[in-house]
Image: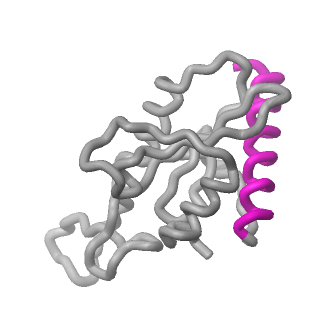
Amino acid sequence: MGAMQRNKGAAGEREVLKLLGERLGITLNRNLSQTRNGGADCVELGRIRLEIKRQEKLNIPAWWRQAEEQAGLLLVSIDTNNNSDGDLNAQNLPGSPPGKPDRLIPALAYRQSHKPWTFVLDSFDLKLLPCRGHLLSMNVDTFCSIVTAHGLSSS
């Protein structure tokens, strides 16, 4: 990937995070370790892991697969103080019931030039349908309403 593409991507990430932050009343930052360590573009929305794309040619299926990969695992830690055999223990995530951590939730934001941001969530993660694969596209206000209504925000 060339420097121009990286700069455009970083500018797109800053743009959407500022937009979301203004509506949610929180400060959101880019995940600066994403290139080195992998991970979503924004990890500060509670359980939501947001992948952000600022491209002219749409490739939503590939982008969604990437968003799912970034959110596919629970955060885990090795509890060496209370567990001598080193078993992995899932940590509670913001918005998760105590003692019952939930899966991280993939989300996608994308925009072409001169068009508004579009956000994508799977209806399964909103408990609307019993199976994965039914993607919902929405504008920024609807996305922020869902984040707020479902307590998925870290604020």
Query: Which quarter of the picture shows residue 56?
Result: top right
Query: At which x and y percent is residue 12?
Result: 77, 38
User: Is residue 9 covered in magenta?
Assistant: yes
Q: In front: 48, or 150?
A: 150
Q: Which residue is at 42% across, 44% downward?
A: 122
Principal SS element in the magenta part?
helix
Does the image show residue 39? no
What are the residue bounds of the magenta stretch?
A: 1-24
- The quadrant in which the N terminus is found is top right
Residue lying farthest to the left in this orientation: 85
Q: Could you tell whether 90 is left or right of 152 in the image?
A: left
Quadrant in which residue 88 is drawn? bottom left
Residue in the image at 57% along x and 71% along y? 154
Up-down relation of residue 81 to residue 129 (above or below): below
Verify whether residue 39 appears in magenta: no
Image side of residue 12 versus residue 101, left or right: right
- Say which residue appears at 43% left-offset and 48% top-offset: 71
Residue at 61% x, 54% y is 143
Q: Position of residue 130 (x, y in %)?
A: 25, 49
Residue 4, percent from left and from top: 83, 23
Residue 5 falls left or right of residue 44: right
Please tell me in which quadrant of the rendered image residue 108 appears.
top right
Residue 51 in view in this figure: yes
